[in-house]
Image: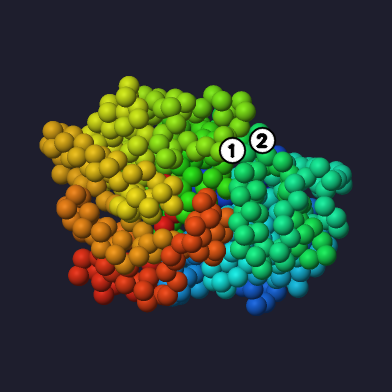
Amino acid sequence: MFLPTTSKEIQQRGWRRLDIILVTGDSYIDSPHIGTAVIGRVLLNAGYRVGVIAQPDVHSAGEILRLGPPRLFWGISAGSVDSMVANYTALGKKRKGDDYTPGGDNNRRPDRAVIAYANLIRRYGGSNVPIVLGGLEASLRRISHYDFWTNRIRRSILFDARADVLVYGMGEQTVLALADALNRQTDFRSLRGICYIAPEPKADYLSLPSHATVAADHQAFTEMFHAFYRNNDPITATGLCQQQDTRWLVQNPPALPPTTDELDAVYELPYTHAQHPFYEAQGAVRALDTIRFSLATHRGCYGECNFCAIAVHQGRTVYGRSEKSLIREARRMTAHPKFKGIINDLGGPTANMYGYECARKLERGACPQKRCLYPKVCPHLPINHDRLRRLMHELRRIPGVRRLFVASGLRPDLIFSDRTAGDRYLKALIRYHVSGQLKIAPEHSEPHILARMGKPAIDTCTLFRKRFYQITRAAGLNQFLSYYLMAAYPGCTQDDMQRLRHYTRAQLQAAPEQIQVFTPTPSTYGALMYHTERDPFDGKPLFVEKDRRKKLFQKEEILPARARSKSSKTQKPRGNKH
């Protein structure tokens, strides 16, 4: 049974009033891969009466008032993708499609959806209960941040939305604690994983440079971002304060990661793995084609790529589900009437980060001055792919499962660093789990750009390609590698793209078409470089291409001729997975 999205469903459940209403920029898709559905299910499981309003019209009262006012709070999310990324390409063109909107047309998600929905609720909501922000858009815009679409530093979204609380990161446990505090009418301001507005700074918290200062001074903005980034580990982080106007943003330390049992419980709630019929009547959502029969193994990422916000949103520590939970979920999939025997994906932000973690990091937190994979894989990371390989073996033995694919992308450097089980894992992956093509993300070929991305040297990609095709040929299979590449990253010139084109032709023997123009998204070092035009780690000036036509030229430098005519059209947003 879905969470109610109509008054009729509330009556059918015998409820008089909802405790919490969740408002989202996606359609209501009841899946463990969709944040609003997860939060709603977790709250419902705890005994709260929860409803969902998806993609409400922001120009009238009708839809936002459909369920009446909630008793405890309104919860707002822009959806699975930052609304500005969902609505515009890196070259500023309006996107025509939206995989999370019924029918697929991009006509329901407003720009700056979190702010738009908060304004809508204040205008028509008819309730004085708190407005709580959450999800990716809110999480990554929780402090003063560079906004690519206006080319300026914007305040915390908590202030611009005039909301009461912001839940950042993966917020299941935080939202439960917040709901409990609001239900008991006790002070919630000590909860981990939240931001709130205060009249003065908190005495024992680190004070960041003010919004006015960082908006005017690139060096101050850089120093602020370093401090913000360093304080994202739940074990080592201190609380942060930042003056926004006459008031202060207060960010409490991050929530502690869930245990394996807690994470299993979240994913094993009774999701329907479908779009709510109210919205299904308006058209199908393409996202379900990918996520309905996919298994999420873990959260977090070792990679910390500088263009990616996963380290800030999900964390640098990888924590995963148990094998038993994943096998139970796969067995339930086989009973679904639409299941055709294929599990589309087994993975997470990166597929082969499941099943191992640094003991020091778990005890003392992530290293403040050191990364797990850059410039080389840390020798203290106990990489072992055997647990993942055995899991894949058990899943493909389940009656009714014909094929199990891995579509989340890989880190080849982790495979090569695993001298015990890496090659065994790769052989099993290629033999059983590739759906014609396997994705990897070298992003570029030039050392100075890879260094600013936080990516491994291109030799890793070259070696991986060689080994992939050796195993593929030995297995008698017809499958290939596809490559994610990036144009117009800070430091990248047209000459660099020419060298990348030469590398792809000579070494990869390919003419890749998966080329993304860099989008500076909030809370990433890439966005910091784009804004300041300096390398934040050595302070040196940095060439940054900001002319849209020249960005397009960089992309077209590497495209095959047949694809160049399409390159200026809508680009689908690519997830930050590597």
Based on the displayed image, in which of its 4 quarters is residue 41 positioned?
top right
Q: Is residue 435 above or below residue 287?
A: above
Q: CA distance from mark 2 to mark 1?
A: 9 Å
- From the viewer's side, name the closer residue of 239 and 285: 239
Tag in front: 2 or 1: 1
Q: Is residue 122 above or below residue 171?
A: below
- From the viewer's side, name the closer residue of 87 and 463: 463
Instruction: Please name the residue shown 56% across and 25% down the image.
Output: 360
**Which is more N-terminal, label 1 or label 2?**
2
Tag shown at residue 236: 2
Coordinates of residue 100 in the picture (x, y in percent): 48, 61
Tag shown at residue 368: 1
Amino acid type of the residue that numbered disc 1 sits on in the rendered structure: Pro
Coordinates of residue 254 in the picture (x, y in percent): 67, 42
Amino acid type of the residue that numbered disc 2 sits on in the rendered structure: Thr
User: Residues at badges 2 and 1 in contact (C-beta under 8 Å)?
Assistant: yes
Coordinates of residue 326 in the picture (x, y in percent): 46, 32
Instruction: Please name the residue shown 36% across and 40% down the image.
Output: 411
Based on the displayed image, in which of its 4 quarters is residue 56 positioned?
bottom right
- From the viewer's side, name the closer residue of 543 and 251: 543
Determine the secondary structure under disc 2.
Answer: loop
Coordinates of residue 309 in the picture (x, y in percent): 53, 51
